Amino acid sequence: MADTVGARNNPDEALDVAQFELAVRRYVYDEILLQEVIPTAAQIAYGLSRSLDEIISSFSRLKEAHILVLQDGDREILMANPFSAVPTTFVVELGTRHWWGNCIWDALGIAAMVKGNGRISAVCGDCHDPMTISIDEGKARFADGTGIIHFAVPANRWWVDIRYT
C-alpha cells in the first residue's frame, strides 16, 4: 500500500505522497505566476485544504529532491527554482509583472518560463555596475549590446551550496 497524506477536512481525499507532492508544486508555481510571490506554508495549507504539518513535511521531501530550497528553520520556501522568495539583484520584468531570480541563470529561466517581452535587471557580481538584458521574442540581448554572463561555479556543483550559487 502506498504512503498517503490525509486531507484535513475529508479523509476520503487522501492522496498518495507523489500526488500530494505534485499538488504542492503545482500550487506553488501557479501562485508564483499569478501573484508574483512565493506563497507561505500557511497559504499553501489553506489553498489545498491540508494541515500546516502536511505542507511542512512536503517541503522536507521536496527539499531532499532538490525541488525547493527552504529558509532557515525549513518551514518556508526560499527558492522554488528558478524563483526567489526574497528580493535579489536579478529582477525579471515582463509587462507590469516581475519576479526575482536567484542568479542570472534563474532570471533567464524565468523569462523563458513566463514567455513574453521584457527585461532582466541585474548587477555585475564583480564591479556592481547595473546591467540590463532585453528579452524580445524569446531572445536575450544585453541592452547596451555588450556583456558576458559568467558562472563562477560549474553547474554540476551548484547543489553543494545552492544558496551561494
Image (cartoon, grey):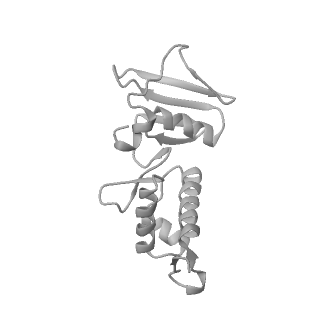
Q: State the image coordinates of residue 149 (x, y, percent, origin top left).
A: 47, 23
Q: Which image quadrant for residue 152?
A: top left
Q: State the image coordinates of residue 16 (x, y, percent, origin top left).
A: 56, 74
State the residue in front, 15 or 122.
15
State the residue in front, 74 or 151.
151
Q: State the image coordinates of residue 17 (x, y, percent, origin top left).
A: 53, 71
Q: State the image coordinates of residue 48 (x, y, percent, origin top left).
A: 55, 71
Whether residue 162 is visible: no
Residue located 56% across and 38% down the image: 109
Residue located 43% across and 28% down the image: 151
| Horizontal side, residue 22 vs residue 130: left or right | right
State the residue in front, 4 or 72.
4
State the residue lying farthest toward the right: 137
Residue located 45% across and 54% down the image: 68
Q: Quadrant of the C terminus?
A: top left
Residue located 43% across and 40% down the image: 102
State the residue in front, 41 or 59.
59
How many numbered markers are drawn?
0
* In the image, residue 145 above or below residue 150: above
* In the image, residue 134 above or below residue 94: above
State the residue lying farthest toward the left: 73
Whether residue 160 is visible: yes
Q: Quadrant of the N terminus?
A: bottom right
* In the image, residue 52 above or below residue 111: below
